[in-house]
Image (cartoon, grey):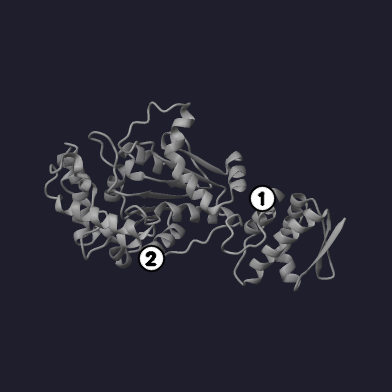
Amino acid sequence: MNQRVIPLRDLEEERKLFGSLDRNLQLLRRTFKVEALSRGGALRLSGSPDSVDEAARALDRALERIRSGRAVTDAELESLFGRGASEEAGTAHLGAGSDAAAPRIAVEPRSENQARYIEAIRKSVITFGIGPAGTGKSWLAVASAVQFLRAGQFRRIVLCRPAVEAGESLGFLPGDLAAKINPYLRPLYDALNDVMPKGQLKRYMEEEIVEILPLAYMRGRTLDNSLIILDEAQNCTNMQMKMALTRLGARSKMIVTGDVTQIDLPGHKASGLLTARRILHGIAGVEFVHMTRADVVRHPVVAEIVRAYSKDEEQHHESPGAGGHAAPSSHGHPHGAPHGAGHGSAHAHGSGHGHAPRHGDGRHESHAHETHQRRDHGDVRPRDRGH
């Protein structure tokens, strides 16, 4: 039997560490199979040497967070104490370089538009994040969702995306339906693995605290007390977008992300994201945030690639037939607005609901995106020629 004494500074630190009704302390005992008693301003651990060492490391990490001066939620402490000895064994420190540490999440904007996006997610019922690849739309949405979940603001996270092939046919892949669908959902798993330990994610998915599913599986559901993320929304049809938005139940929030320069819908189908951007602005609780190539946070070469495609698309904007189907420029400027009139700037000076398309050239540009897209697919209708 081994013993260890963990000194505590005061009653307030003890209260934060143990949690309501000693919930965290009980979790520590169950997880690491140790006895833990509070006496004389210290926590005394006893048990097998390995169990005591692992419990002491978890306590050190928790106390480091509490003593850093920032607010620490009960959910964060529970995640530290409840991950299990097998996951704790390989993690000796809580430092930023620890991939396994929980919570592994710091939602910090790297640009002004990202800051607006995070603020919109916090305040709005439905937030649309629109911008080119690499601007952090999906990652920030997932990371924010995990933060909300840990803070107890929602009971579950539901992530979905339309199963649309990006120019390749996957119909003959081996496996059952689940195996065929999984490649479409892989980016969502990747984002979750970035901000949540694998063991915790596995448990949350088993308990349906976290759901990842194709958009088609959302039909008929009402999602209460949930944070819903609709990813790759540019590949939703109008009917799919309406269906997704109307899944929102009581005490729920939704984040919709998409890149209007990468629409993969077949044939004459219009993007539901473009339609939503046109008709939903002005609704209280709905906010649009547009990002530009200046917000790209992937490898620096990604920003140059986006810039090169932007230049090529602008050159072909007036010639949709040039280069055959190479006119995906019809799906909009990849940086979200004409030069000098970025959506991020318009959003900053708007009414707070991200109504960039309502100001100056933004409105014309939004209409041009949609009309140009439909012209590419041979689907220009009189009702689309004005607002």
Q: Position of residue 152 (x, y in %)?
A: 59, 54
Check disc 1 and report its element: helix, strand or loop: helix
Could you give the CA–CA distance between mark 1 and mark 2, rounded to whole angstroms?
Answer: 34 Å
Q: Where is residue 267 in the image (x, y as percent from the top left)?
A: 24, 33
Q: Position of residue 379 (x, y in %)?
A: 18, 37
Residue 87: numbered disc: 1
Residue 152 appears anywhere in the view: no
Q: Nearer the viewer, residue 8 or 227?
A: 8
Residue 192 appears anywhere in the view: yes
Q: Position of residue 329 (x, y in %)?
A: 21, 48
Work out whether 193 lies above or below 58. Answer: above
At 30% from the left and 54% from the top, the residue drawn is 281
Which amino acid lies under the numbered mark 1 shown in the image of this protein?
Answer: Glu
Q: Nearer the viewer, residue 185 or 206?
A: 185
Q: Nearer the viewer, residue 354 or 75?
A: 75
Residue 99 occupies quadrant = bottom right
Which amino acid lies under the numbered mark 2 shown in the image of this protein?
Answer: Ser
277 horizontally vs 95: left or right: left
Check disc 2 and report its element: helix, strand or loop: loop
User: Is disc 1 surrounded by few (<14), some (14 to 19) or many (20+) residues within 10 Å?
Assistant: some
Q: Which of marks 1 and 2 is nearer the N terminus?
A: 1
9 horizontally vs 363: left or right: right
User: Is disc 2 surrounded by few (<14), some (14 to 19) or many (20+) residues within 10 Å?
Assistant: some
199 horizontally vs 386: left or right: right
Which residue, given by chain and number where applicable, does mark 2 sit on? 111
At 56% from the left and 57% from the top, the residue drawn is 104
Residue 161 occupies quadrant = top left
Q: In which quarter of the image is the N terminus?
A: bottom right
At 20% from the left and 56% from the top, the residue drawn is 311
Total numbered labels: 2
